[in-house]
Image: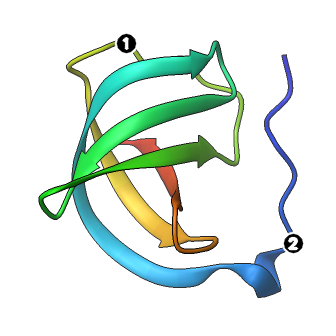
């Protein structure tokens, strides 16, 4: 299963630890608790996260979507 493709130039740097709260689309989109707010999140690489997994936030695509990776 491939990851979601996003142009690197559209990503704003944002870093920290997040917590998976829900899978929206298995292997492609999640909900993540980060900086006292729940966000949508995607990963650049095919990966699987489960509810309550900690992840590393590495960027933000827009006002509602983070880019995450395994810790």
Q: Residues within 10 Å of mark 1 (few under 14, many from 20)?
A: some
Q: Report whether residue 71 is seen.
A: no
The quadrant the C terminus occupies is top left
Q: Quadrant of residue 10?
A: bottom right
Q: Where is residue 69 in the image (x, y as percent from the top left)?
A: 47, 45
> Quick check: 4 left or right of 14?
right
Q: Report whether residue 11 is seen.
A: yes
- What mark, if any, has residue 7 been given in the picture? 2
Q: Quadrant of residue 21?
A: top left
Relative to the observer, which residue lies in front, 71 or 37? 37
Colour option used: rainbow
Q: Quadrant of residue 49?
A: top left
Name the residue beneath numbered marker 1.
50
> Quick check: 52 left or right of 15?
left
Q: Residue at x 80, y 87 (%)?
A: 9
Q: Residues within 10 Å of mark 2 (few under 14, many from 20)?
A: few
> Which secondary structure lies at badge 2?
loop
> Which secondary structure lies at badge 1?
loop
Distance from Cα at disc 1 to Cα at disc 2:
26 Å
> Which of the marked residues, 1 or 2, is nearer the chain's N terminus?
2
Q: Where is residue 35 in the image (x, y as percent from the top left)?
A: 16, 64
Q: Which residue is drawn at 45% across and 66% down?
A: 58
Placement of 61 over or under 3, stated as above or below: below
- What mark, if any, has residue 36 been given in the picture? none
Placement of 38 over or under 65, stated as above or below: above
Placement of 67 over or under 54, stated as above or below: below
> Quick check: 55 left or right of 68?
left
Relative to the observer, which residue lies in front, 63 or 52? 63
Q: Residue at x 32, y 73 (%)?
A: 15
């Amino acid at each position: 299963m491939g990851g979601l493709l996003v142009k690197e130039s559209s990503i704003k740097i944002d870093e920290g630890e997040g917590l998976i709260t829900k899978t929206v689309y298995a292997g492609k989109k999640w909900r993540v608790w980060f900086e006292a707010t729940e966000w949508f999140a995607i990963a650049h690489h095919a990966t699987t996260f489960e509810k309550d997994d900690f992840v590393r936030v590495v960027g933000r695509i827009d006002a509602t979507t983070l880019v995450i990776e395994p810790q």
